[in-house]
Image: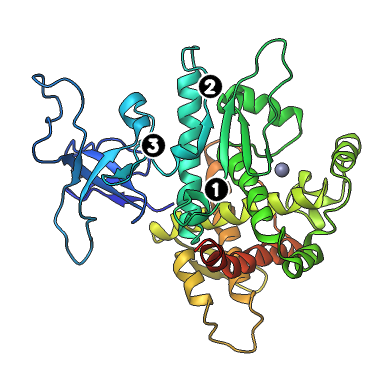
């Protein structure tokens, strides 16, 4: 993800920040413009720290000078209710929006019991990862599908804890409902599960990206036999018995998965292959946006000689890919080039991690069949994003 600059003092600020450390303004993320902005109480509102008036100011407005570099959204905003109540969200809600919760938090249907020690932190950590997911989907033009702005059915979330004597909470997706076991927000517990399951990588953001991939599979393919048939060409026939396939995977995982799949789990069933590949599509776009934001350039050595890479903003590049320069090139060529850049960044990133004695941040190698699956995910997103908005109009 990109970094941001405080709209008031231009200091470097980050997506999840609540306050600018330089000028002390409160920060709010405006989900329509996808920008993090300095805000101050609107005229007539109690000032921050005002001891005469109980309660925080309700209405806020953006602070800063509009310039060629920055346009400031007009009007007044409220903070998301989860900011006011728990300091657990920094998204803004437009003054005329009847919802108390922001576009991301309003999709959460059940949260754990916050009176239990540790649950507030676990839940807030998951909501933070979910806002990152919102950002990437919005950058891809899928925000209507996740915010419900145009009347599309959105995914909903339940963040649940294991209760002694009851069946364990399974992280997963079922017909638009995404359930996350909040134990996954505990680093020690998540690491234990990762090692138990022989996984090289396990993160909250990864879980959310994977599960929302199932939601988008339904959106894209359930009512579109033509696209579904294309999908089967890449991922296989999903009418295969799901329970049986999963059981078989856990009993006898395929040893040769590296040649055709992005992960071992992706071999378990075509739905899981799609969701795993989808998650990696989002991983790579986010990684590339971050690298491009810092203008990262590097050179890789290869038998063919040195290869220089200047990271490009993937979303700008994708917009360019919509009108290919070379009519003879296959439509996926530009995207695969972009994904190769992402793999180059991950190589550098992993080497840097090893220098610090850390595990690889992105412990995956992408084979050509996997790149082709990623290119299909990309193509279907480009095709469907306008359609989702039209269908709901
Ligand atoms: Zn500032
Ligand atoms: Zn919120
Ligand atoms: Zn899955």
**In the structure shown, which secondary structural element does the residue marked by tag 2 occupy?**
loop
Location of mark 2 (residue): 112
How far apart are the two marked residues, 2 and 1, measured between alpha carbons? 21 Å
Q: For disc 3, does the CB lie below 8 Å from ligand 2?
A: yes
First of labels 3, 1 by sequence position: 3
Q: Tell me where residue 156 sits by quadrant.
A: top right
Confirm whether residue 312 shows in the render. Answer: no
Task: Give neighbour class at mark 3: few <14, some 14-19, many 20+ (Cα, 10 Å).
Answer: many
User: Which residue does the image show at 57% across and 44% down from the upper left?
Assistant: 155
First of labels 2, 3 by sequence position: 3
User: Which residue does the image show at 50% across and 60% down from the upper left?
Assistant: 140
Location of mark 1 (residue): 154
Percent across and percent down for residue 45 are 12, 34
Q: Tell me where residue 331 sits by quadrant.
A: bottom right
User: Which residue does the image show at 84% across and 40% down from the upper left?
Assistant: 246
Q: For disc 2, does the CB lie below 8 Å from ligand 2?
A: no
**In the structure shown, which secondary structural element does the residue marked by tag 3 occupy?**
loop
């Amino acid at each position: 993800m990109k970094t941001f600059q405080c709209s008031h003092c231009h200091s470097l600020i980050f997506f999840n920040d609540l306050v600018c450390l330089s000028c002390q303004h409160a920060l709010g993320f405006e989900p329509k413009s996808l920008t993090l902005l300095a805000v101050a109480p609107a005229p007539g509102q109690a000032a921050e720290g005002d001891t005469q008036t109980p309660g925080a100011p309700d209405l806020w407005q953006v602070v800063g000078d509009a310039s060629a570099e920055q346009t400031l959204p007009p009007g007044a905003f409220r903070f998301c209710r989860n900011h006011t109540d728990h300091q657990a969200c920094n998204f803004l809600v437009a003054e005329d929006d009847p919802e108390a919760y922001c576009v991301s938090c309003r999709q959460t249907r059940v949260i754990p019991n916050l009176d239990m020690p540790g649950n507030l932190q676990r839940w807030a950590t998951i909501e933070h990862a979910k806002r990152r997911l919102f950002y990437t989907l919005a950058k891809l033009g899928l925000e209507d599908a996740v915010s419900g702005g145009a009347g599309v059915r959105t995914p909903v979330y339940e963040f649940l804890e294991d209760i002694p004597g009851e069946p364990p909470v399974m992280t997963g997706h079922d017909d638009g409902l995404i359930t996350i076991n909040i134990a996954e927000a505990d680093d020690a517990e998540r690491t234990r599960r990762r090692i138990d399951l022989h996984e090289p990588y396990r993160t909250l953001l990864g879980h959310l990206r994977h599960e929302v991939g199932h939601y988008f599979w339904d959106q894209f393919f359930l009512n579109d036999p033509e696209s579904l048939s294309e999908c089967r060409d890449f991922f296989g026939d999903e009418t295969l018995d799901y329970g049986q396939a999963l059981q078989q995977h856990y009993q006898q995982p395929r040893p040769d998965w590296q040649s055709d799949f992005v992960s071992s789990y992706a071999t378990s069933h075509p739905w899981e292959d799609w969701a795993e590949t989808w998650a990696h599509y989002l991983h790579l776009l986010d990684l590339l946006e971050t690298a491009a934001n810092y203008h990262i350039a590097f050179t890789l050595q290869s038998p063919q000689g040195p290869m220089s890479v200047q990271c490009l903003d993937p979303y700008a590049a994708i917009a360019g890919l919509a009108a290919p320069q070379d009519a003879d090139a296959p439509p996926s060529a530009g995207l695969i080039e972009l994904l190769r850049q992402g793999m180059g960044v991950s190589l550098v990133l992993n080497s840097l991690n090893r220098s610090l004695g850390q595990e690889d941040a992105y412990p995956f190698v992408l084979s050509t069949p996997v790149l082709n699956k990623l290119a299909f995910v990309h193509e279907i997103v480009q095709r469907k994003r306008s359609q989702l908005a039209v269908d709901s109009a």
